[in-house]
Image (spheres, rainbow, N blue to C red):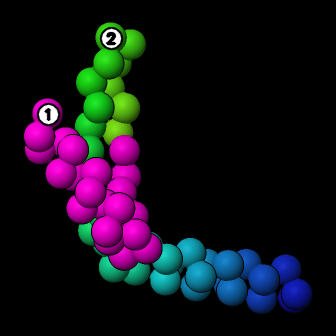
Amino acid sequence: MLKKIALAACSVLFAANLMAAPDKATHVVLDTSFGQIEIELADTKAPVSTQNFLGYVDSG
């Protein structure tokens, strides 16, 4: 019985995670000779640093 309750609780938590709001973070792709690197910027945690980095990206 306890296993069924634990399974149900995990299922509910997993479903809630799937229904969460999609991530709207800014992503930048860095092209190198070894392939592409995708960088996710922390807009909400470091907005000033994100804008500074994007300024460098835009300037080349």
Screen quadrant of the N terminus: bottom right
Q: Nearer the viewer, residue 1 or 59?
A: 59
Task: Name the residue: 18% across, 51% down.
Answer: 55
Could you tell me if residue 27 is visible in this image?
A: no
What is the x, y in percent for residue 19?
Answer: 39, 79
Apparent side of residue 31 relative to residue 11 in the rendered image (left or right): left
Tell me where residue 47 sits by quadrant.
bottom left
Task: Spot the residue most to the top.
Answer: 33
Q: Residues within 10 Å of mark 1 (few under 14, many from 20)?
A: few
Apparent side of residue 16 relative to residue 3 in the rendered image (left or right): left
Screen quadrant of the C terminus: top left
Work out whether 15 lies above or below 59: below
Please, what secondary structure does the residue beneath circle 2 have? loop
Read off the magenta span. 39-60
Could you tell me if residue 6 is visible in this image?
A: yes
Q: Which amino acid type is shown beneath numbered disc 2?
A: Ser
Real-space Cα separation, disc 1 to disc 2, in angstroms: 17 Å
Tell me where residue 7 sits by quadrant.
bottom right
Q: Which amino acid type is shown beneath numbered disc 1?
A: Gly
Please, what secondary structure does the residue beneath circle 1 have? loop
Task: Name the residue: 58% across, 85% down.
Answer: 12
What is the x, y in percent for residue 11?
Answer: 61, 78
Q: Nearer the viewer, residue 16 or 58?
A: 58
Is residue 23 a member of the stretch shown in magenta?
no
Work out whether 8 lies above or below 40: below
Q: Which residue is label 2 attached to? A: 33
What is the x, y in percent for residue 14?
Answer: 56, 75
Task: Name the residue: 24% across, 62% down.
Answer: 51
Work out whether 30 lies above or below 21: above
Q: Nearer the viewer, residue 34 or 21?
A: 34
Tag in front: 1 or 2: 1
Residue 60 numbered mark, or none: 1
